[in-house]
Image (cartoon, grey):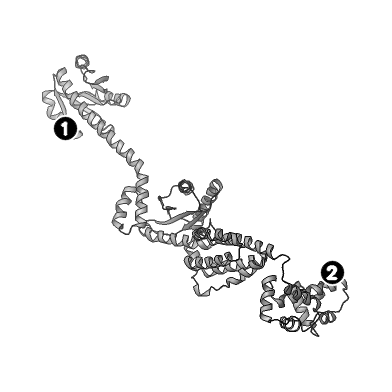
C-alpha cells in the first residue's frame, strides 16, 4: 500500500478529509497530517510518503513552496493540490514540478479517490518499469563478463573487427581510450584439465587486481592489463605461476607483449603467440617477452653427426651418450631453428637410436613417435631422448659385457705388452701383428670399446705412467717418457700427461707426497 501525507492549515478540512476518504479501498494508508508546508516537509523526511495531498494557501510555507522543495529533495513523490477557485492560476505554477492533479475546494471523497487511483496507477507503472530496468541491469551484469570474453576473443582473432567495433564496445565496457595496455598469454603444461584454465585465470585476476579484459582462446588464457612498471608486472606474473604450480602441480609458460594502444590488440596477440612459439626452446614455466625472441634463426649453422650418439649407445657407454645428447640439444637450442625443422632433426636422431634397441622393443619405440612429435618444449624432448638412450645403451652394455671379440682382446693385450714401443700404432698392430686391414680393425675396435685406438693407447700409457710414479716417485721424467714409447721427447710426454691427468708429472709427484 502507498503512504499518503495530508496537509492543510484548516483543522476541519484536515479532519474531514481524513475521515471521509476510504484510504484502504484506494490502495493507500494515511501515514500522517501536517498544518503547514514547513511541518509537512519535516514529516516527509520522517514518514517517506508516496503521495502528498496539500492545500495551496498556508502560513509559514505555502503549498507551492512545499511542492518546489519536495520535488527537489524527493522527486519521486506525487502531489494532489487542493485550491480555492481564485487560487487556481497561482497553484497551476506547480505544473513545472510535474503536478497533474488539482482539486477545487470544497471537494469530496469521490474526487480524492479518483485522483488517488490515477496516481496509484502511475506509481504502479513506474514500479513495474523500475523492476524491469533492475531486472535488465541484473541480467546485463550477469552476462557482461561473457560479452567481454567473446568481444576480446573476436577482436584479437577476427580481422573484420575494426576501430568502430572497438569504440562501440569501449563505451559499453566503460574502458578508457587513452592508456596503453599489455597482453598476457598463459600456456599450461600438458596434460591439463579444462578447469585448470579457469583456475589460472582466477589466480591472475586476484594477483593483477582485476585485468581490463580476459578470455580463454583454445588452450590459452588471454588477459589485457593496463601498462605499468615492467619489473613489477613481471614479478606479479612469476607470482601467478608460483601459486598455480603450488596448488595444481603444473607449470605455466607466460608470454608478455610490449605495451601498445588497445586498438592494436590483434598485433599484440600475434606477438604473444610468437613468444609462446619460442617457448619450445626454453623450459616449461618460463616468462617470455619479445626481447627473448630477437635472436635470429641460424638454420645453416646447425650440423650434427647422429652417429656420435649412436656409437656411444651401441657400445653401452652411458656417459659418452649423455655428452653426445647434450651437444645435440645444445646445438638445436643455439641455432634457434624453425620448430618443424628442429623436430625433424629430433625424429631423425630418435629413429637412428631405435635401430640399436632390442629387436622385441623396436615396435614399442616406434609407437612413441607420435608422443614425441606432440612435445612442446626442447627441454622435454631432451628428457624423452635421454630416457630412450639410457634404456638402449643399458641393453647394449649388457650384450657387450665380456663379449669383446677375440681380435679386440688380442689388440688390447698387444697394447699392454707394447706400451714402451715407439712404433705402437693401429697400422703397426694391423700389419705387423694381426695381418689385417687397418681401417677395419680401427672400426671394430671403436665399435666394441667405444674409443679410438690412438686414444686408448695414450690413456693406457698415462695410466701406466701414473702407476710407475706412484711406485717410484724418484723416477726421472725423461726415463719414464722413454720407457712408455715417447722416445727422447719428455716435453711432449709432459704435455700429454697434463692433458689426461690434469697436472704435470712433477705436480703429480708432489701430490703423492
| Quarter of the rendering containing residue 257 | bottom left
Position in image of residue 107 (x %, y %): 14, 19
Classify the position of the C terminus by image quarter: bottom right
Residue 512 shows which numbered tag? 2
**What is the residue that sits farthest to the bottom in this orientation?**
488
Q: Earlier in the sequence, mark 2 or mark 1?
A: 1
Quarter occupied by the N terminus = top left
Q: Helix, strand or loop at disc 2?
A: helix
Q: Position of residue 483 (x, y in %)?
A: 83, 80
Residue 93, disc: 1
Q: Is residue 340 above or below residue 103?
A: below
In the figure, is residue 498 to the left or right of 269?
right
Contact, CB < 8 Å: mark 2 with mark 1?
Answer: no
* Residue 15 position in % (x across, y down): 22, 14
Report if residue 159 is visible in the image.
Answer: yes
Q: Is residue 60 at all visible to an observer of this figure?
A: no
- Identify which residue, 162 or 160, lies in the foreground: 160
For residue 322, what is the image quadrant? bottom right
In this view, the mark in front (2 or 1): 2
Instruction: State the residue in front, 321 or 67.
Output: 321
Residue 24 appears in which quarter of the rendering?
Answer: top left
Is residue 460 left or right of 394 when viewed as pictured? right
Q: Is residue 455 left or right of residue 171?
A: right
Amino acid at each position: 500500500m502507498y503512504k499518503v501525507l495530508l496537509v492543510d492549515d484548516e483543522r476541519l478540512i484536515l479532519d474531514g478529509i481524513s475521515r471521509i476518504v476510504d484510504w484502504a479501498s484506494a490502495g493507500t494508508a494515511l501515514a500522517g497530517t501536517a498544518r503547514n508546508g514547513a511541518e509537512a516537509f519535516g514529516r516527509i523526511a520522517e514518514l517517506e510518503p508516496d503521495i502528498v495531498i496539500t492545500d495551496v494557501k498556508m502560513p509559514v510555507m505555502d503549498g507551492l513552496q512545499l511542492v518546489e522543495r519536495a520535488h527537489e529533495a524527493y522527486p519521486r513523490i506525487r502531489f494532489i493540490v487542493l485550491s480555492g477557485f481564485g487560487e487556481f492560476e497561482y497553484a497551476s505554477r506547480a505544473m513545472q514540478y510535474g503536478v497533474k492533479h488539482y482539486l477545487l475546494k470544497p471537494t469530496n471523497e469521490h474526487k480524492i479517490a479518483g485522483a488517488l487511483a490515477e496516481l496509484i496507477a502511475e506509481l504502479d507503472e513506474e514500479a513495474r518499469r523500475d523492476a524491469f530496468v533492475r531486472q535488465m541491469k541484473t541480467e546485463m551484469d550477469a552476462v557482461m563478463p561473457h560479452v567481454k570474453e567473446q568481444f576480446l576473443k573476436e577482436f584479437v582473432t577476427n580481422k573484420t573487427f575494426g576501430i568502430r567495433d572497438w569504440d562501440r564496445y569501449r563505451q559499453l565496457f566503460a574502458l578508457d581510450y587513452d592508456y596503453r595496455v599489455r597482453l598476457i598469454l598463459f600456456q599450461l603444461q600438458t596434460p591439463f584439465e579444462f578447469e585448470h584454465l579457469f583456475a589460472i585465470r582466477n589466480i591472475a585476476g586476484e594477483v593483477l587486481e582485476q585485468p581490463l579484459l580476459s578470455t580463454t582462446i583454445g588452450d590459452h588464457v588471454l588477459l589485457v592489463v593496463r601498462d605499468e612498471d615492467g619489473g613489477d608486472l613481471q614479478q606479479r606474473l612469476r607470482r601467478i605461476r608460483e601459486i598455480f604450480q603450488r596448488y595444481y602441480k603444473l607449470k605455466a609458460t607466460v608470454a608478455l607483449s610490449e605495451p601498445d594502444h588497445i586498438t592494436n590488440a590483434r598485433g599484440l596477440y600475434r606477438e604473444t603467440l610468437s613468444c609462446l612459439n619460442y617457448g619450445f626452446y626454453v623450459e616449461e614455466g618460463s616468462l617470455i617477452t619479445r626481447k627473448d625472441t630477437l635472436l635470429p634463426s641460424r638454420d645453416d649453422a646447425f650440423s650434427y653427426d647422429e652417429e656420435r650418439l649412436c656409437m656411444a649407445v651401441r657400445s653401452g657407454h652411458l656417459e659418452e651418450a649423455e655428452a653426445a645428447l647434450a651437444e645435440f640439444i645444445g646445438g638445436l637450442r643455439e641455432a634457434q631453428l624453425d620448430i618443424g625443422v628442429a623436430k625433424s632433426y629430433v625424429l631423425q636422431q630418435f629413429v637412428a637410436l631405435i635401430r640399436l634397441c632390442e629387436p622385441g622393443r623396436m615396435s614399442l619405440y616406434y609407437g612413441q613417435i607420435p608422443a614425441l612429435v606432440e612435445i612442446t618444449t626442447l627441454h622435454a624432448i631432451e628428457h624423452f631422448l635421454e630416457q630412450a638412450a639410457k634404456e638402449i645403451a643399458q641393453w647394449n652394455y649388457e650384450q657387450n659385457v665380456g663379449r669383446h671379440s677375440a681380435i679386440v682382446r688380442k689388440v688390447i693385450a698387444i697394447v699392454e705388452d707394447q706400451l714402451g714401443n715407439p712404433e705402437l700404432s693401429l697400422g703397426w698392430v694391423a700389419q705387423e701383428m694381426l695381418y689385417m686391414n687397418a681401417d677395419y680393425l680401427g672400426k671394430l675396435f671403436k665399435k666394441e670399446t667405444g674409443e679410438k685406438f690412438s686414444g686408448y693407447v695414450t690413456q693406457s700409457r698415462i695410466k701406466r705412467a701414473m702407476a710407475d710414479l706412484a711406485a717410484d716417485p724418484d723416477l726421472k721424467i725423461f726415463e719414464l717418457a722413454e720407457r712408455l714409447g715417447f722416445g727422447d721427447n719428455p716435453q711432449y710426454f709432459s704435455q700429454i700427461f697434463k692433458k689426461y691427468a690434469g697436472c704435470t708429472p712433477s705436480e703429480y709427484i708432489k701430490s703423492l707426497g
